[in-house]
Image (cartoon, helix red, strand yellow):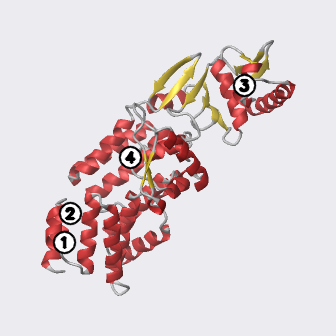
Amino acid sequence: MDSLIAAAGRALTAGDVLGALKHVGWRDDPAALALRGIAMAQLGDYARARDLLKRAARGFGPGEPLARARCVVAEAEVALALRDFGGAPQTLDDAAHALAMRGDHTNARHAHLIALRRHLLLGRLQAARAAVDALDMDGAPPAHHALAALAAAEIALRSLRTRDARSALQRAQVAATQARIPALSAEIAQVDALLQRPAARILHAGHEQPVTLDEVEALLASGTLIVDAVRHAVRDTAGVESFARRPVLFALVRALAAGWPDDVDRTALIARVFRTRDPDETHRARLRVEIGRLRRLLSPFADVTATERGFLLAPHGARGVMVLAPPVEGEQGALHGLLADGMAWSTSALALATGDSQRSVQRALALMEAAGQVRAIGRARAQRWVAPPLAGFTTILLLPAVPPSA
């Protein structure tokens, strides 16, 4: 390694991006291209960074597997910042293995941390938990301890284990302070702020109240019968019944819960569930059928009794009923949650994260764009979507594939 490459590497480690570029900004050899790519990534020019890292990897070739693997890891980190999940995860795993086999355990661990972050962004909590458990943190630098603890905090937050999340955030902040990386400390502070902001709304007896993640966790443990409009489920401390694939039945139980402790008029139920203002006998017959199905599903939690004017939700035992509503209503909730991180997402990445088809995501984005909730930047394959953060609320509960009882 020549003196200029060594000096540029030390400058990047110290956070002096411009100093690093002064040493290698005019060079086109593979090592210099790699350092320039990392510098561009730190400056936020991810497209330029990716191009430089690709050129560096090609320049190193198969004869220099260690340098090539480091370029692959750096490029994967840039792809993560770009919210580009098109690359094969196996490529990153192979690079991590190659680094570990050649004694570069620091960069191998960094590759595993990138893979962990990818799992979190895609809502794959089980895979993320397994990745955290598999991390070898012996001899890890403070920055890696901070990133691992930050990932553990996010897993706990999205599983509604706020005490575990706070403990992990404290560990992350201590490690970030030791690492002396301001951007990392700022990211940890941002996650910590999520615990203080409202995450959902409670609808009860005609009143609405914003609640934090702590309050949601306490509510779920209180024994109250919860109609969870965030995850489309009915839950109490004894169990959960998912209505994710039963939209009509969930609309029914939500309407009954919103009306509790009173009954709900049949005509109002038909209008709410079947979206018609002129009900006829066929609608009334269908309502009776759907109520019968709902009774069977709710039998462990409550009864649905007929009254003179409609139907009444009667929870078992002396307890109340509450609706846990998301900060944003509608089918675009998961998209709001993903885009709230302030990064630019591609349609394909959003489809992968939500589990919907690209066509469905495109239709939802078009509706959100018409409502002024998102905007597109770029064209064709380079098009990305961005959205302003949701004022006053955290969208942690809107993120996909995260059951609160996990």
Q: Earlier in the sequence, mark 3 or mark 4?
A: 3
Mark seen at residue 342: 4
> Which is more toward the observer, 315 or 16?
16
- Please rate how many residues cluster around mark 2, counting C-alpha atoms within 10 Å: few if below 14, some from 14 to 19, many from 20: few
Kind of element beneath mark 4 = loop
Query: Which amino acid type is shown beneath numbered disc 3?
Result: Ala
Q: CA distance from mark 3 to mark 4?
A: 38 Å
Q: Earlier in the sequence, mark 1 or mark 2?
A: 2
Kind of element beneath mark 2 = helix
Kind of element beneath mark 3 = helix
Percent position of residue 363, x then y = 58, 48
Q: Earlier in the sequence, mark 4 or mark 2?
A: 2
The image shows residue 96, relative to residue 309, as above or below, that is below
Q: Earlier in the sequence, mark 3 or mark 2?
A: 2
Q: Earlier in the sequence, mark 1 or mark 3?
A: 1
Looking at the image, is mark 1 or mark 2 nearer the viewer? Answer: 1
Q: Are marks 3 and 2 in contact (CB under 8 Å)?
A: no
Mark seen at residue 271: 3
Q: Earlier in the sequence, mark 4 or mark 1?
A: 1
Disc 2 designates what residue?
Answer: 13
Q: CA distance from mark 1 to mark 2?
A: 16 Å
Kind of element beneath mark 1 = loop
Q: CA distance from mark 4 to mark 2?
A: 26 Å
Q: CA distance from mark 1 to mark 3?
A: 66 Å
Q: CA distance from mark 4 to mark 1?
A: 30 Å
Query: Which amino acid type is shown beneath numbered disc 2?
Result: Thr
